[in-house]
Image (cartoon, rainbow, N blue to C red):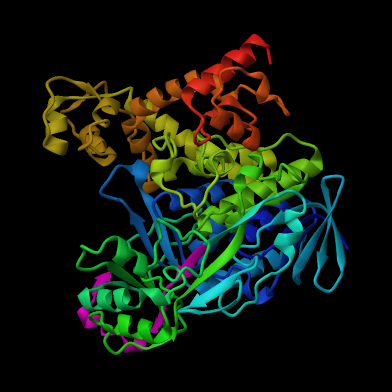
Amino acid sequence: MRFDVVVIGGGHAGIEAAWIAAKRNVSVLLITSHIDFIGQMPCNPAIGGVAKGNIVREIGALGGLMASLIDRSGIHFRLLNRSKGTAVWGPRAQADKDRYKKFARHSLENHPNITILQAMVTKLNVFGEQIRAVILDNGQIIHAETVILAAGTFLNGIIHVGLNSFGGGRAGEPSSSGLTENIRQFGISSGRLSTGTPPRIDSRTIDYSKLIPQHGDDDPWPFSFFTKQKLINRITCWTAKTNRITHQHIIENKGNTFLYSGKTAGAYPRYCPSIEDKVVRFGERDGHTLFLEPETLEHQEVYINGFSTSLPFDIQEKMVRSIEGLENTKILRPGYGIEYDYFQPLQLKSTLESKAVKNLFFAGQVNGTSGYEEAACQGLIAGINAVQNIKGDPPVVLSRDSSYTGVLIDDLVTKGTDEPYRMFTSRAEHRLLLRQDNCDERLMPLAYKLGTVTQGEYDERQRFWDKKRSIIEWLYSIKISPEAFYMATGGNIQKNEIAGDLLKRPEVGFEEILKGVARNVPVINEAEDIPQTDRFLTLGIESDIKYEGFVRKQFNEIEKLRRFEDTKIPVGFCYDDIPGLLTESREKLIKISPDTLGKASRIGGVTPADISVLAMYLMKKNL
């Protein structure tokens, strides 16, 4: 057997890697430990959120699969941060986890360039520092031009419930042994990380009269730019709260967890902590909010979001039943912790290709990230660049000012991680540019060039962009009188004002501007036909105009930094030749081997003074 791209793992990173590579007309083999679990959601079956939702929309704009999958399988949709500026809005949806898996598998199975194989990979065949093949546990050799490792939490995975531990990649599935040790032979170092899940409970044993409902949006916003059907909320989620009794059970028994018993060497996620960790770290709080989220339409499982735990089963029962509304609850699946191998992402290029082994890519939790969305965007970029290598084309690297995906990957390959990495808006210094409503304008031209969106899809979005630009031009071509503005908004202006400038005011919306234009008395230089818009167009127009000044300032800053950012550092550059570098900086630069000054500047421990010394040296040597 011989394939252009072999993807190891059928989780969210593996799905996107296989899908995007196949769309570029190469042969793809997806190897998974269990075909029925392709697209499995072992933690909360939810997609999106603040910053994470932007990543999903970026995946969709680049031709990936996750955005359309969640639109098709979603059962509860909410747009988060609506009370704040549109730059930090975040779409989120609860999925029917069974339908999500079904749609993911169906998409992959029905792509003519994708073959799926249920097997376990135990070794990689590397010759001359280049990947050549993968070897299965049955001894079969599969030849590959490129390989993408997207093994999630399966590498030497150990599951912990209380002080009981057993091998597993996730509940009900075996771990993968031997592959980490094989990869280490190529000079690639590994570490250990940990994460966990909460118990699932029977919805029929919940007293909903004591809980607070959390309804979805009346008219949900889709993730995919090409979703045409109206999205429907099919469930209600609920909120509950822990209390002092819950906390007492935790404090008295925390020594019975792998986290506090010293049984684990893996760092736990700081930003998605277990309930034990929350109670220990924030002991002054009377309670922690929990979200009860149904997992499917057909079954009774409810996920307790915010209640991740690895305490013994009997203690989990006491904890759950101490919560108001859950006094008689039955646990269907206990929560558990899991510890697994990952590979330090400092060993990767910005394409997610290994620096040590050519044509070997890493994506997802094996790079130290947490979250379905973070995994999926890495799989997509690894898949794109695997094909770039096969075709002999230049690498595709997304910049920090182009996408949250670019921020995530740049953080990983320049700063590394010693705990599961999660995306936040605060990680993106250019987040005003990276809104969820403009992902298509930022990234779809690249997708069209790569062939991952069709001509028809691209033309459809171009018509949208053209209409938005024409309406913005129209707004700057007309003026509104004080009378019209007062009648439309109740606000006051002293003289005739350009409509586009009025829209920059925080309290003024596009619809109010149109009302002002439509008044009989009020308009200076008569408006032609007032344009018709939908909510997507209105959002784009308002966001572009309201953020215009800030965006222009950011673009000016980016242009000033771009020359510095893109200054190349030659491959194999010898830092020992540069006098004046701090020893710590020299060691980190040698270890990480950044290919630009910009990446060098973001390495933890490398000082601005060292970057100045390096920049002057490169200029002096004309390198």
Of residues 395 and 357, the one nearer the viewer is: 357
Residue 410 point in image, percent of width and height: 55, 39
Of residue 416 and residue 30, the one placed in the foreground of this image is 416
Q: x%, y% of residue 190? A: 64, 55
At 60% from the left and 17% from the top, the residue drawn is 579
The x and y percentages for residue 191 are 60, 56
Region rendered in magenta: 194-215
Q: Is residue 39 left or right of residue 334?
A: right
Q: Is residue 83 left or right of residue 438?
A: left
Going 73% across and 29% down the picture, which residue do you hit?
572
Nearest to the observer: residue 402 or residue 582: 582
Left or right: 482 as drawn, with respect to 531: left
- In the displayed structure, 262 sits above or below 6; it is below
Is 197 part of what is drawn in magenta?
A: yes
Q: Quadrant of residue 396?
A: top right
Say whether residue 96 is visible: yes
Q: Quadrant of the N terminus?
A: bottom right
Q: Is residue 275 magenta?
A: no
For the point 35% across and 28% down, which residue is it?
A: 550
Q: Is residue 506 above or below residue 74?
A: above
| Horizontal relation, residue 48 to residue 455: left or right | left
Seen in the picture, residue 325 relative to 492 is either above or below; the reply is: below
Query: Is 579 drawn above or below residue 233 in the view shown?
Result: above
Out of 563 and 571, give the one closest to the viewer: 571
Residue in the picture at 36% in, 74% down: 254
